[in-house]
Image: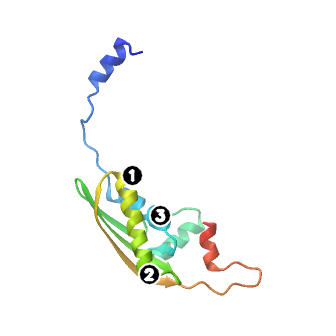
Amino acid sequence: METGMEHELAEEQPAGTGRTVISDSAVAKVAGIAAKTVAGVYSLGSGPSRALGAIRDAVGSSDHAAGVRAEVGETQVAVDINLVAVYGYPLHDVANQVRAAVYRAVERLVGLQVIEVNIEINDVYIAPPAKPGGKSGTEREALQ
């Protein structure tokens, strides 16, 4: 049951006023998290950003936006992603799946129209041979 006080508060706080700004870095983080969920993505970023990411991982931190750049407009966003794919996965399939995941995540979570997702696969990760009783590099992915 609504009291008179609740009705007054609703009238004092009109819906739809104000401005919301979503930063490029926030969109890049959403896109990076979505990209990392795709099978066949080993890591995001180019050589230097991957090296910095390895250091962050070692100290228990991570940069979900590494290798991702976003340009946010009033109602639209464009995303560029650099990644390393896992050997054995068809590269075009990996790119298409990353693109689809980023479109879904950004449009759903950010609420902006994605106009393009450009993907550059700058390397292919080849897992070292498994040691007897040990874990290979691709098993590392399953553990993360």
Q: Residue at x 59, y 71 (%)?
A: 141
**Judging from the image, what secondary structure is the residue with disc 2 in?**
helix
Tag of residue 109? 1
Type of residue at label 3? Asp
Residue of label 2: 91
Q: Residue furthest top?
A: 4
Q: Position of residue 23 (x, y in %)?
A: 32, 55
Q: Position of residue 15 (x, y in %)?
A: 27, 32
Q: Is residue 9 left or right of residue 143?
A: left
Packing grade of label 2 (10 A; few <14, some 14-19, many >=20) is: some
Q: Is residue 116 left or right of residue 92?
A: left
User: CA separation, marks 3 and 2?
Assistant: 24 Å
**Judging from the image, what secondary structure is the residue with disc 1 in?**
helix
Q: Residue furthest right?
A: 133
Q: Is residue 135 above or below residue 104?
A: below
Tag of residue 6? none
Residue of label 3: 63
Q: Position of residue 79 (x, y in %)?
A: 32, 66
Q: Quadrant of residue 128?
A: bottom right
